[in-house]
Image: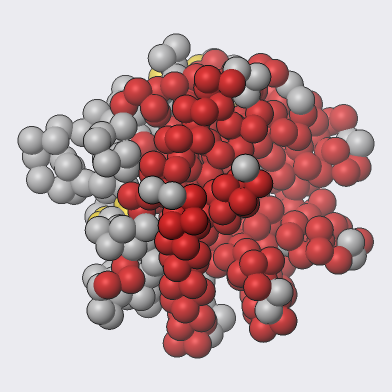
Amino acid sequence: MSRTHRVARYETALDFAERQVAALVDRHPDYFPIYTTRGRWHHAGELWTDWTGGFLVGMMWQFHRRTGSAEWRARAEHYAQLLEHRKQDPHVHDLGFVFLNAYLPWYELTGDKRLLAVIIEAGQTLSRRFQPQGQYLCSFVAPTSLFIDIMMNVPLIQYVANQTLDQDLARIAVAHCRTTRDRLVRPDGSTAHEGIFEPQSGQFLRQSTHQGLRADSAWARGLAWSLYGYSKMYALTDAVEFLHVSERNAEYWLNHLPADRVPYWDFHADLTLPPPQGAQKESSAAAIAASGLLDLAGQTRLPDRAAAYRDTAIAMLDALVTPEYLAIDTPGWEGILKHGVYHTAKGLGVDESVMWGEFFFVEALRKAIQMTNDE
């Protein structure tokens, strides 16, 4: 495919994404959905945890950056303010997802110190989940639980540490990354979803899972979180140890993708079984990994790896912009990407659109267009 043709396809996908998000906010104002049900956003099912609001705002900021539209900026500012109270939310481990996507782009655009203060307070709130005995930020499930997902949220703490020169925050962020590396990232680069610790001593007990196939399997979205999260932490710290973890994750990812480059929901899924437990694709994991791999391609010190990361990211995006995954030719579908997965075991958002898949797809497309135009 020529560069011109690829960029045109990606721009078409972004145009469609803008239309879908505009329709969502017009149809359901001030609503933050997590997943679709039969392609429609206004679900009544379980949320499990409230963690995705920043992705909707983040897309609005992406659209404003792309077009310069005052309308998208106004929407982004309005929806971000609806989330500001979450800066004091002590019940979730996902404040990075909220504030790095809803408030950081706003602050970067304006330099308004009031916005930075919101980000700082959110990072300080998240840091209070730190468990000194085990040296990790605990998940929303329990103080004894460490999730791989938190690797995408710990950059909020590191960002705040960099802004405030708070060494205690920096120490917490680095300690969490090292504990996650040592307890959840396996020698082959795959990852566990969860680690369980003894509450008093902080001793590590076992790997576990809520969303993967098994405790010892490789849940696709969790691996994407790790790959991207360690890349982000390397960007914020220049700590090569974190770059090496991301590269290990990437090696597993590249070596285990199916032919169309879009993973199944778990790399250990039995493909002789029907979805959802078997051959269920996971477009959101592909979108996350594509965006992370594009960053990692610019970070790795090995040219052959950089080329492999770029080529794989582009191959995944090329698949995602086809009508098999992009809902552009699916009448009545309100999301952008089909075949995403939220929670297989609970039956939530399986083979649907999921809000993080939408955001990282948009983000990855914009990165890929910029990379292509710069070449």
Depth check: 50 or 375 in front? 375
Q: Is residue 293 left or right of residue 214?
A: right
Depth check: 277 or 92 in front? 277
**Residue 49, visible in the rendered structure:** no
Can you name the residue that lies furthest to the top here?
187
Q: Is residue 219 left or right of residue 114?
A: left
Q: Is residue 23 above or below residue 113?
A: below
Question: Which image quarter is the C terminus in?
Answer: top right
x, y percentage for residue 149? Answer: 51, 40
Q: Is residue 231 left or right of residue 275?
A: right
Residue at image location 55% in from the left, 61% down from the top: 55
x, y percentage for residue 135? Answer: 65, 23
x, y percentage for residue 124? Answer: 78, 46
Depth check: 132 or 253 in front? 253
Residue at image location 71% in from the left, 25% down from the top: 174
Depth check: 25 or 119 in front? 25
Quadrant assignment, res 76:
bottom right
**Across the whole image, how many numbered discs are drawn on residues?**
0
Residue at image location 27% in from the left, 80% down from the top: 332
**Residue 274, visible in the rendered structure:** yes
Residue at image location 39% in from the left, 27% down from the top: 254
Q: Is residue 54 above or below residue 300?
A: below
